[in-house]
Image (spheres, rainbow, N blue to C red):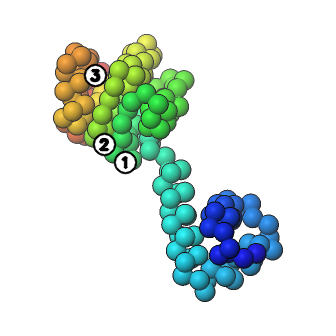
Amino acid sequence: MQFHDDTLDREEFIVKYLAGKAPAASADAFESHYLDCPECFTELCASSLLRDALTAPIVERRQVGDAVVVDFAAPSRLVAGSREYEEFLSSVGASSDTRVLIDLTRVTRVDSAGLGLLMRYYSRVLSNNGKFSVVKPSKDVEAVLEATGLARLLNISRDEVEALQRLAQN
């Protein structure tokens, strides 16, 4: 295979190569080639980094004692149709959590769909006789929570330690 004949063919091949779906003979030839070709090596590295960034989870769930902490790994927008919204929805979908802390530190924007999702999770936690807390919303997100009256419901804390202490109280 000639790796410099057609740029689009090369890019498609690199995608297959990174996914482990390139034919063995072509993969072997590419491995011999890219080690001596700065252009192909750079493109391979860039494609690998891009793939990793696009597939890395944004919403992370972790257990701290008896509480579930949900946070965002990167600056995020909790708005209809965003990847962050969809990940948040799937991470809290049918949960039966009873002590929940949502860290909104990295959420830069929320719309009515995002507020609705937060409220759906809040309602589910309360229906399970649980407690729900929000940590450090950004100024813009906090302004939306205040304007909608949700700040009073969602039990906003300054940091994770304070929120976890509130969740632990009976």
Mark-to-mark CA distance, 1 and 2: 6 Å
46 sits left or right of 77 in the view: right
Q: CA distance from mark 1 to mark 3?
A: 22 Å
Q: Which residue is mark 3?
A: 154
Q: Nearer the viewer, residue 50 or 126?
A: 50
Which residue, given by chain and number where applicable, does mark 2 sit on?
A: 106
Q: Amino acid at mark 1?
A: Ala
Q: Earlier in the sequence, mark 3 or mark 2?
A: 2
Question: Of the residues tagged 1 and 3, which is closer to the observer?
Answer: 1
> Mark 1 falls on what kind of element?
loop
State which quadrant residue 40 falls in: bottom right
Comparing 82 with 165, the one in front is 82
Mark 1 — residue? 74
Q: Which residue is pictured at 65% across the width and 75% down the height?
A: 4
Furthest-front residue in this view:
5
User: What's under tag 3, amino acid-wise?
Assistant: Leu
Label 3 – label 2 distance at C-alpha: 17 Å
Q: Position of residue 70 (x, y in %)?
A: 40, 37
Q: Position of residue 56 (x, y in %)?
A: 50, 51
Q: Quadrant of the C terminus?
A: top left
